[in-house]
Amino acid sequence: MEKSYDDTNTEKSGLRLKDTELRLGLPGSESPEREEHDQNVLSLKSFVSGAKRGFSDALDGGGKWVFSGGSGGGSEGLFSPRRGGNNNGGNDLSGSDSGLGGPVLKDGVAPKPLVVQEKKSQVAAGNGNTAPASKAQVVGWPPIRSFRKNTMASHPPKNDNDDDNAEAKFGSGCLYVKVSMDGAPYLRKVDLKIYGGYKELSSALEKMFSCFTIGQCGSHGVSSRDVLSESRLIDLLHGSEYVLTYEDKDGDWMLVGDVPWEMFTNCCKRLRIMKSTEAIGLAPRAMEKCKTRT
Amino acid sequence: MQKKVACSFPDEVLEHVFSFIQSDKDRNAVSMVCKSWYEIERWCRRKIFIGNCYAVSPRMVIRRFPKVRSIELKGKPHFADFNLVPDGWGGYVLPWIAEMAGAYPWLEEIRLKRMVVTDECLELIAKSFKNFKVLVLFSCEGFSTDGLAAIAASCMNLRELDLRDSDVDDLGGHWLSHFPETYTSLVSLNSSCLGSDEVSLSALERLVGRCTNLRTLRLNRAVPLDKIANILGRAPQLVDFGTGTYGADLQSDVFSSLAGAFSSCKELRSLSGFWDVVPAYLPAIYPVCSRLTSLNLSYVTIQSPDLVKLLRHCPSLQRLLVLDYIEDSGLEALSSSCKDLQELRVFPSDPFGEEPNVSLTEQGLVSVCLACPKLQSVLYFCRRMSNVALVTIAQNCPNLTRFRLCIIEPRTADFLTLEPLDVGFGAIVEHCKDLRRLSLSGLLTDRVFEYIGRYAKKLEMLSVAFAGESDLGLHHVLSGCESLRKLEIRDCPFGDKALLANASKLETMRSLWMSSCAVSFGACKLLGQKMPRLNVEVIDESGPPDSRPDSCPVDKLYIYRSVAGPRFDMPPFVWTMDEDSALQVHALHVAEYNRKPDWIGVGTYEESIQGLRAKMPFVLYLAELSNTSQCSSQPLLSGDTTLTPPRPLLRLPIETLESDDKTQRSKEGKYMIKMRYSMNPTICFEIRPISTRSFPGV
């Protein structure tokens, strides 16, 4: 089988450090990189044809070609930029590479467990309990448009022969509500059904909107996200800066946390993370919160 | 003398000839014949379709086609319909509208799918295009009825306003009254997606009454049943009607006026809506049923016998959308009543329940396929399937062009044999030679992909979920499906190898989506670096992918071909893997809109784009927002580095940077700016310091 690359090319085939090097230059100066690029494209093409043969070789070689390990053609070391010159040693796949080699999972571990398998084990575990409402949802499955889901959920199908399970069938699916945060550039949507209670919702929202609160920390000259520790985040959302509010079915804006969780999920239409300063008219509790924290 | 033949016709003659050529494919072919034909064609192209708004920039389109009257754009990947694409991903139409406002003052039609449209966009449309006629917002979001009011008030020549399936912030029905009393041009109105309980019925009735050319009217749920007769009475010429709520306490006078109104609609061919149906009112539509070709009962939650009773009155039906309440027995009845059926969609009434709630199985679909020879398009949700059923379907419906089967429980085997459904789907692709769209489900091994690669030569769009065993499956598809344009995959064990081996195939496709698969970050980087005409975007909400080893799989991957280079409106959780990808790491979010902004002067967008590519320092013109919720600056401009003189960037506020930020900024090459288009009119900026972590040796 044709080898497009051998070990001596590994250096070239690796991450081209020169290309990604920071360079200084005045506006208008040339950035010389294009010729190298064509070379890359060419080499990729020749590799591709080699790789195809690699596949058929693997097939002809008997046995199904599998993801990790297995016998195969020669080692094609192109797509493993960090191996630093040693095709086999640095590679965590046991045995020779098959086909493309490349940046595969360490230790030849199978692809990460898929969501559904986890879901299944949850269902199995739950079988002993009394009437689980529905199994854990896989996001976006079955593939039903949001418009349909929301329409069916807000007006659950009525059955003439009314069983218990006729109640809000679609409602047991998911309940997406929009969450906006003052100052954030776009809305998010959350599925209220996946949270067990206010605490889970609160921490999920913190995580989701953490990137938007970096500016609040004040620029301490360090702009990296790493700096933003969890405790600072929590202080922001639980502290005096923001309160979590929701719009209920009547169109009124209420403070989150006053009613039982079930009732909340039934009447919440959208959420808003509001600045405490704007929440003055909302409820006395918001002001109390500010006072107690400061 | 032979050489001159092509040029011997005056341009006007060629232009006239070209005007008879409407399809994009043919137009593209014409433009490739020779240079002069390219020139003539581009000046007379009136209609543009752009399947991926990021494949090309507005500036490029305008430069090539200066006289466009109609544009269609698509934004987010298809899986955004199922909440797999996080909010803020992109698909903003504002840059397009902004550019076209200047370049295409005579633009008449805008059709958008899965894009983010703001009220600002709608106001800009209303203001900029004097002869605006058609606005279709299919599955869009980000706007409210205030924006619609602006359209209504200004677009005197508006013919079509279609909001189907869009997520609209419905502030009440008053937007309808913004259509002036002198406005009469409406031909088509679809506001069925509006969710408010309020609707201005009098404005609606007056509008319908004075627009005598109205052919399509789809109402939203807020319109009560007892108002339908009145509305229909004013528009007996309707061809396509969507009711609002179709339920109320039964009153004989309401019923008879309803039936009377329907019977006077002699042109009616399509019905939809029917929310909250009360079965007793259904017979009111019997007068029109015999002529109906399209019926959307997909929100009708009544039992099979009532559905069948209705369908028996509709022998001309070509298109039916229905819930699985119809059951196998109902589909059997359908197959004997409606021989002309071309399209069938059966939706699940209880998709999240553990047990089936209705008796709908593969038999229903089989009976329809056996009896309806014209069937071309199928969307079917069910809970069990067998290979023998699929083979029967394939053999009896060789004309299928779209086949989407969703077996609700992932990885469900053939219920008769407990084998995978490879053979069944294999039969579909083998027999249905014109199949253009296919969605798979059930238990599937790599074999099904072998069949698909071998037989599905006309397949353009393939959706795969919870299927396959190894990269070989993906390889079969990428190497075998010659017509493939869109491939979307979720939760399949496909990794790097097939993807990298078929990298060049990706340039022949519109896009590839892979989520919850096994593609590593390293492979994504490599693909992005080696394939300059592909945009490789990694979506990962758990943090920067380079904070983990290269071998870690990415959460979601979206690859699409583009001549516009990487986009600049990505949210924090989307990383582009282009050649500069090593430079983009952290984000400092600087937008804080109600503080006094500082002016930080500097360069132009063009210079900044140059800077991004040549890794140069740069900054931005920034300006003050008048208040936190309205952007008073110019609309966004897209970046085209060839433009001279350079144009100023959209001006935005920026929070005061600490003094050491400024000094850091003066250290050349250390900063990069990314722009974000937001759903709200306010737009924020990020200044990203370049981390030295990603590239060793710097």
Image: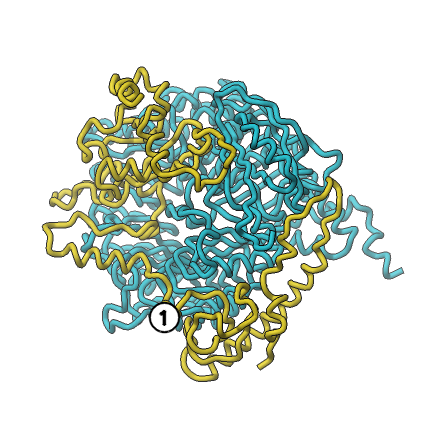
Query: Horizontal and vertical percent for residue B75?
Result: 51, 44
Observer-nearest of A118 and A158: A118
Query: Horizontal and vertical percent for residue B385?
Result: 28, 65
Query: Horizontal and vertical percent for residue A103?
Result: 48, 65
Q: On the image, which quarter does residue B388 sit in?
A: bottom left
Check the image and report above or below for B164 versus B601. below
Which chain comes out yellow in the rendered image? A
Observer-nearest of A16 and B373: A16
Residue A160 as seen in the image, left or right of residue A154: left
Check the image and report above or below for B416 versus B401. below
Q: Quadrant of the N terminus of chain B?
A: bottom right
Q: Residue at x 61, y 35 (%)?
A: B665
Let me know if residue B229 appears in the view. no
The amino acid pointed to by label 1 is: Thr
Residue B300 as seen in the image, left or right of residue B77: left
| Chain that bears disc 1 | B
Q: Residue at x 56, y 51 (%)?
A: B582
Observer-nearest of B498 and B573: B573
Query: Horizontal and vertical percent for residue B152?
Result: 50, 24
Mark 1 element type? loop
Check the image and report above or below for B118 versus A173. above
Colour that chain B carries in the picture = cyan
